[in-house]
Image: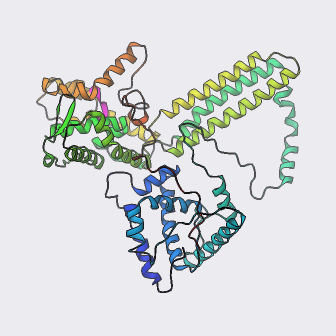
């Protein structure tokens, strides 16, 4: 509906909206959220596969949309990106309907879906153009990356669908058209490369084509290796100057499983929890005191486990505690991904785009040559074999890349941590158990290797048996089978769903709650 704006003080309203905590997240992006789960902006970025900076920009534009809805004097229609923010905010029902609509806006702002049909489409297109005009009058030119043209905005609405990425691969379309490039430009370019027609692959004889195609496959795989390192970022970064705490180290090297293991050791050593018969119980919640070496991730994980055990009022298994710490660990992974230490979804999509591009070119050329050979009654067995090898090689490269969690900067931080926390120190501690030794960073980094040195006393066997036994067993099997084991989980393990995540809870995309299913049947803006 159109809000009543006749008696609204625009300056006061804008101040209230600009400082309003959408979804409970502070309007100032430099202030950390109060809750330990996913913040509103982080959930928005995850649900839409956006970078966190873009998600926050869309939230800021959503604030401006709210202001226009209350002051423009006509029904307003958001852009598709702003509409996604609106959809998610509606899920936070108390924050939206009470905190915003009752306490900030002059009247409730309802989400009016389109009824469908050409008349509705024309009406909402007109509303969107009027919204852009009101936006420019109030705030200046709207950013095109959030507020596209009317044609582009409604093309997005028609073409957008929800996709389960576990079942489908997403391949971006190649945009052949470029602004300012006409047909004459393409014609001139075609004439310029006419002398290269002699090198046209389909003019080559069979053995020559097989050799050229094999060279192209090898070149493509070599390019993939180079492209992976390019998309993985650079290790020369100012972030490398600061050392990580044990909570950050645990997330970096082993994901949420390593974080849970180290957290439980810390809580048991401080007298907060106890372990008995494969379950953990709360002993003294007030014994949890923050120490100097506890980083924010470590503090959040300890509080999450202690609060969960205290609220449940009964012993909990390791699997249940893994679920309890899931949101905290996912939030930590998101923060480390934003800081450039873990590979982001953007880095992964860049690599996959390159891999799909190479695969499409090789298969297209090989497929056309196969048709050419069949038409000329020529054998194509060796060519098909080359195409199979190319597909297997590219799929293997994509599978390997999907298991790499660390960016180049994260790998450099891990290498420096290995230098700062050498395994030789663990051997020295085992020889002199009375030495002053901070075991948590070593457990966070080395995991079961450190546990083997640190928990040799009978009173500490619970840690080896409950926290690290399955990892050690899995690695022993891999070693017996002639494989290899990466004790620090540089590429596998952790939350990537690899060898160590025996509970099946791994998820490299992070994230907290599953969210709400369903969705809106389309949005035309505020009903008029």
Q: Main secondary structure of the magenta part?
A: helix
- Assign the C terminus to one quadrant of the image: bottom right
Q: Quadrant of residue 326?
A: top left
Q: In screen coordinates, is 402 left or right of 331?
A: right
Q: Quadrant of residue 302?
A: top left
Residue that appears at 61% across and 25% down: 393
Residue that appears at 42% across and 43% down: 510
Image location of residue 208, percent across then percent down: 80, 20
The residue most toward the left is 434
Image location of residue 164, percent across then percent down: 54, 42
Q: Which residues are magenta?
A: 444-449
The residue most toward the front is 115
Seen from the viewer's position, the closer of residues 507 and 282 is: 282
Q: In screen coordinates, is 233 left or right of 422?
A: right
Residue 204, visible in the rendered structure: no
Image location of residue 476, percent across then percent down: 34, 17
| Location of residue 404 with respect to 298 vertically, above or below | above
- Assign the N terminus to one quadrant of the image: bottom right
Residue that appears at 67% across and 34% down: 358
Residue 432, visible in the rendered structure: yes
Is 447 contained in the magenta span? Answer: yes
Is 95 contained in the magenta span? Answer: no
Seen from the viewer's position, the closer of residues 334 and 428 is: 334
Seen from the viewer's position, the closer of residues 381 and 453 is: 381
Residue that appears at 26% across and 36% down: 262
| Location of residue 420 with respect to 188 vertically, above or below | above
């Amino acid at each position: 509906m159109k809000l009543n704006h006749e008696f609204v003080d625009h300056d006061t309203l804008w101040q209230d909206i600009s400082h309003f905590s959408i979804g409970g997240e502070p309007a100032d992006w430099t202030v950390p959220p109060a809750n330990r789960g996913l913040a509103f902006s982080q959930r928005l970025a995850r649900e839409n596969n956006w970078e966190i900076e873009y998600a926050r920009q869309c939230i800021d534009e959503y604030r401006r949309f709210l202001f226009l809805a209350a002051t423009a004097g006509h029904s307003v229609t958001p852009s598709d990106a702003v509409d996604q923010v609106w959809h998610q905010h509606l899920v936070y029902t108390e924050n939206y309907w009470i905190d915003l609509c009752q306490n900030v806006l002059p009247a409730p702002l309802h989400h009016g879906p389109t009824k469908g049909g050409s008349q509705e489409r024309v009406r909402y297109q007109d509303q969107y153009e009027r919204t852009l005009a009101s936006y420019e009058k109030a705030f200046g030119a709207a950013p095109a990356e959030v507020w596209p043209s009317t044609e582009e905005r409604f093309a997005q609405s028609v073409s957008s669908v929800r996709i389960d990425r576990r079942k489908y691969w997403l391949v971006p379309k190649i945009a052949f058209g470029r602004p300012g490039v006409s047909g004459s430009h393409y014609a001139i370019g075609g004439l310029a490369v006419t002398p290269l027609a002699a090198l046209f692959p389909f003019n080559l004889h069979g053995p020559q084509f097989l050799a050229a195609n094999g060279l192209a496959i090898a070149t493509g795989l070599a390019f993939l290796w180079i492209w992976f390192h390019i998309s993985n970022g650079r290790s020369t970064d100012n972030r490398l100057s600061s050392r990580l705490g044990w909570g950050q180290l645990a997330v970096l090297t082993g994901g949420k499983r390593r974080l849970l293991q180290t957290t439980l050791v810390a809580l048991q050593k401080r007298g907060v929890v106890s372990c008995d018969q494969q379950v953990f119980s709360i002993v003294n919640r007030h014994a949890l005191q923050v120490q100097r070496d506890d980083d924010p991730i470590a503090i959040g994980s300890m509080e999450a486990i202690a609060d969960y055990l205290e609220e449940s009022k009964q012993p909990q298994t390791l699997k249940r505690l893994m679920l309890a710490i899931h949101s905290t660990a996912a939030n930590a992974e998101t923060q480390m991904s934003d800081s450039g230490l873990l590979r982001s979804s953007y880095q992964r999509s860049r690599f996959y785009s390159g891999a799909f591009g190479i695969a499409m070119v090789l298969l297209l050329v090989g497929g056309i040559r196969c048709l050419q050979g069949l038409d000329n009654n020529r054998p194509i067995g060796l060519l098909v074999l080359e195409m199979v090898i190319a597909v297997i090689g590219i799929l293997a490269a994509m599978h390997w890349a999907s298991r790499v969690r660390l960016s180049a900067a994260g790998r450099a931080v891990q290498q420096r941590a290995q230098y700062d926390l050498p395994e030789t120190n663990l051997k020295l501690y085992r020889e002199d158990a009375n030495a002053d030794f901070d075991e948590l960073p070593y457990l966070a980094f080395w995991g079961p290797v450190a546990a083997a040195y640190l928990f040799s006393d009978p009173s500490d066997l619970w840690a080896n048996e409950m926290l690290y036994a399955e990892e050690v067993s899995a690695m022993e099997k891999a070693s017996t089978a002639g494989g290899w084991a990466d004790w620090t989980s540089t590429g596998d393990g952790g939350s990537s769903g690899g060898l160590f995540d025996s509970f099946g809870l791994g998820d490299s995309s992070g994230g907290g709650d599953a969210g709400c299913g369903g969705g809106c049947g389309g949005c035309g803006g505020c009903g008029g």
